[in-house]
Amino acid sequence: MTFQVSDFPSYPRKNGDGVMFSVSNAGEPVLCIISRVALEEITHRRHIKPNDVLACFRGASAAIHALALKKLQTRPESVSGCLRLWTDDLDDEPPISEPAAAPPSGNTQQPQPLTV
């Protein structure tokens, strides 16, 4: 399938069972689609209502774009066309709602259990 620049959405839009969006790679637009299941996984929401799909995408767009660019960097140059993001692509990614691990405070003592 050949894509033209006019095929690339300038904003995310629903596309069947996912969301179509584009990223820029070396100044060239790359058409991407994240599956609805992957969107549910990355946002930790289940059964996203059709009217909420784009809002969920926007809430996680930074993580989704970063994931697309990471996958694009590992894709062989001989492969072209639409980049699809599936739940398998999220296996190595930390959930977006998980806070970063706190640095050690220097206190190495373990809390003691309460005795009654």
Image (spheres, helix red, strand yellow):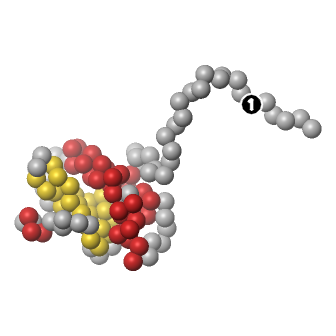
Q: Which percent across, then down, holds residue 62?
A: 33, 52
* Residue holding disc 1: 111
Q: Residues within 10 Å of mark 1 (few under 14, many from 20)?
A: few
Q: Which percent across, then down, holds residue 83?
A: 22, 58
Is residue 42 at all visible to an observer of this figure?
yes
What residue is at 48 percent from the left and 72 percent from the top?
A: 47
- Amino acid residing under circle 1: Pro
What residue is at 35 percent from the left and 51 percent from the top?
A: 63
As drawn, is 46 to the left or to the right of 80? right
Q: Which percent across, then down, holds residue 105?
A: 59, 26
Residue 61 found in image quarter: bottom left
Residue reaching furthest to the right? 116
As drawn, is 92 to the left or to the right of 8? right
Image quadrant occupied by the N terminus:
bottom left
Q: Which percent across, then down, holds residue 24?
A: 17, 52
What residue is at 20 percent from the left and 60 percent from the top?
A: 22
What residue is at 81 percent from the left and 34 percent from the top?
A: 113
Is residue 71 at all visible to an observer of this figure?
no
Q: Under tag 1, what secondary structure? A: loop
